[in-house]
Amino acid sequence: MEVLQLNQTSSKIQNPETAVPKTPQMNERDFLNDQLTTEKYMTASYNIALNEASNQALYQDLATIFKETQDCQRNLYNLMFKNGWYAVEQEQQQKVQQSFQQFSGYKSQLPYTVQ
């Protein structure tokens, strides 16, 4: 069972941190962080390639690879978050509501109906 903690001073949400050895050698957290960074870079690069692919077969292959890479990135993120090695900032409810209202207002400016 996950136990999320909210640090009141920094508004960070994270699970309790799994301890790793504090040595000069890379540990499990370091390896996962390196791989997560790589997967984020790769998904961004595949996204650009998808936008510029003119051949349909190439586009389909890239889309498949992109999805696999994105899923890998998400799994790594979930693993790091579960171990308390990745924290996210909690946003104030007022700011979330303001953004929601702002972008909801954009619907009337679109040339098609958004449901």
Image: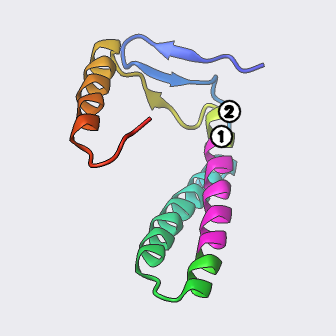
Rendered position, 40 above or below 2: below
- The residue positioned 60% from the left and 58% from the top of the image is 70
Q: Nearer the viewer, residue 90 or 7?
A: 90
Mark sitting on residue 82: 2
Residue 25: x and y in percent read: 63, 57
Q: Does the image show residue 26?
A: no
- Type of residue at label 2? Lys
Q: Magenta segment range?
A: 63-78
Label 1: which residue?
78
Residue pictured at 50% horizontal, 14% vertical: 6
Question: Where's residue 11, x and y in %?
Answer: 40, 18
Q: Vertical placement of 96 versus 49: above or below? A: above
Residue 95 position by quadrant? top left
- Furthest residue in direction front, as rendered: 112
Residue kind at label 1, given as amino acid type: Asn
Q: CA distance from mark 1 to mark 2?
A: 6 Å
Picture coordinates of residue 35, whole percent (x, y): 61, 60
Q: Quick check: marks 1 and 2 in contact, CB under 8 Å?
A: yes
Residue 66 forms part of the magenta stretch: yes
Name the image quarter holding residue 113.
Answer: top left
